[in-house]
Image: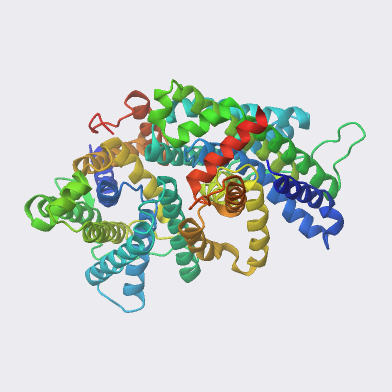
Amino acid sequence: MSLLFQQALNGLTLGSVYALVALGLTLVYGILHIPNFSHGALYTVGAYAAFLLVGKLGANYWVAMLGAALIVALLAVLTERLVFSPLRDAPPLHDMIAAISLLLFFEASVQALWGAEFHRIQAPFTQIIRVFGLVAPAQRLLIVAGAFVLMLALHLFLSRTMLGATIVATAQSRQGAALVGIDAAKVSMLTFAISGALAAVAAVLFSPINLISPGMGELVITKAFVIIILGGMGSVVGAIVGGLIIGFAESFGAFYISTDYKDIVAFVLLIVILSLRPQGLFAPAAR
Amino acid sequence: MGGRERYLLAALLVLALAFPALAPNDYYVTVISVAFINAVAAIGLNLMVGYTGQLNLAHAAFMAVGAYTVGILTVDHGAPFWLAFGLAGVIAAALGFFVGLVSLRLKGHYFAVFTLCVGFIMFLVIEKWDGLTHGVVGIIGVPASAAIGPLSFKSSIAQYYLILFFLLAGLVVMRRIVASLVGRTFIAIRNGEALAEALGINLMRNKLLAFMISTFYAGIAGALYAGYVRFLGPDIARETVTFDMLAFTIVGGMGTLIGPVVGAVVVSFVTQYLQFLHDYRMVVFGPVLILLLMFFPRGIVGSLQGRAMARRAQRSSPVPRAGAGEGAEAEEAGLAERARSNA
């Protein structure tokens, strides 16, 4: 029972982090129809920004998280302005290649600045919480709670505010949105900022229990892609559900099959599902 | 092919043949040999990306399959080198068949993302499957390309000519393919899948064919790599390697025959001068590539061809045609030209 609970909690933690990263990816895809490979690098940069703020400036964990979110949001907006916006009319191949260039550029920059070795961000809570004989490290609970609060906030933002509605409208139809006076350039900058901030927060939440390194974003981004393909590219609910599915699959896969191959579980799941349903699990029929 | 272009190609060929004599030392021969091996793989990638319009991000993994086929068969099972060499291409293409069967059902972005994941799985399998691939330790002491009759490939210069031979053979075969009806079919798919399908082109079958040819090239390139470098580690399957090949293709010119070769040579040479950057070359390369995509998307060969066609168009039509150098029109002129020379 306790072991099962451990795995479930691990799955929930992983799933929450993946879902946050996948949400940013799916939002950007909805607006610009770009698979933003550089999103994984934003995740990495977020972790390092927080590491810098905590280490060099002695910032509090929460301040560092906020700072990292702001820095990465700005960086994401810059990539939108300098790279993706000028390439809007180029063939889709070019967008994708540019996105990979950005990913490798950020990764190499992080490695040049901080070296290839692993670092750790000190966790704000190190206690272990015991309820009814079940054991849960506080940081894991924090990740799950933090992720769900953010998802709820994002949901409310998209469904209840005017600004959020402009994002949804642009995702539904760029031309239609322009017709009713929505500035598409502003919306895409806003979307990139949100997606960057989500990636940074996910990284800062996760890095106390998972070391940070220049290549840390690669696995996360590939899994985030698996998630949004499963959930349907551009679908917010799909990203959340997909994230949890992959998180649980990985945690139970590591436990029951082999820790060596736990990273493959997500991809095998993807191949099996896409072989049976090429349009993804939750995607509408038309693509 | 225009006269000027033919002279240029002949000059390049002479340069390639004379290169070991011209190179100041063996090091340059090594650099160019590796560049040529990568070029063979890039030619295959170009068929998929440049001609058929499908971004396959698992290409390096197929190259690794070819390399490991040679490594495993020769080191662990004592198979003759050239048997393993041939099998490398066949196994890579066979794997390409099964991967393609699943992945080519997906279109556009989905295909790119899916192949990224497939490449990652292949990398992880190579890294983790100790029993077959020796895991992170890698395969050490792959035998060098075996002698064929009196021809021995012990020296680095002999190796160079062996690699050059396969590169030229690869180019000749690729030229036949892209100039054929099959090649035209691939280009039609790139230019518009819906239209191609409406014309009666079986998308799946043709894409699968392109994918298998492309992975066959990757397998052969991997086999050449195994025989030349003689050490294999799982890192050769990484997506950064695929990205290098993409960079070669873009710099040289996507969808042009010798673009990937020109790109591989140019980029490899430039990289030599950026040696001090070491692992950080992407700090420079990333932005440079993005700038190329924005301002020079047709690459070296593509731009030269565009200019040559504009000149020809100017000469043949009495009224100067505005914008004849632009992509689509030049390409059409190129296709018509090729059709004429074939007829």
Q: Is residue B101 visible?
A: yes
The percent position of residue B44, horizontal first and vertical second, equals: 60, 38
Q: As drawn, which residue projects farthest toward the right?
A: B150
Which residue occupies the foreground of this view, B88 or A140? B88
Q: Is residue B251 visible?
A: no
Q: As drawn, which residue projects farthest toward the bottom?
A: A57
The percent position of residue B311, horizontal first and vertical second, equals: 61, 51
Question: From the viewer's perspective, is residue B237 above or below residue B87?
Answer: below
Which residue sits at x=36%, y=33%? A270
Q: Quadrant of the C terminus of chain A?
A: top left
Q: As drawn, which residue projects farthest toward the left?
A: A160
Image quadrant assignment for residue B144: top right
The percent position of residue A65, horizontal first and vertical second, equals: 25, 66
Task: Give the left or right position of residue B85, taking residue A202 as reference.
Answer: right
Task: Give the left or right position of residue B182, taking residue B220 as reference.
Answer: left
Question: From the viewer's perspective, is residue B166 above or below residue A52?
Answer: above
Which residue sits at x=34%, y=23%? A276
Question: From the viewer's perspective, is residue B290 above or below residue A229?
Answer: below
Image quadrant assignment for residue B69: top right
The percent position of residue B39, horizontal first and vertical second, equals: 66, 46
Q: Quadrant of the N terminus of chain A?
A: top left
Which residue occupies the foreground of this view, A270 or B60? B60
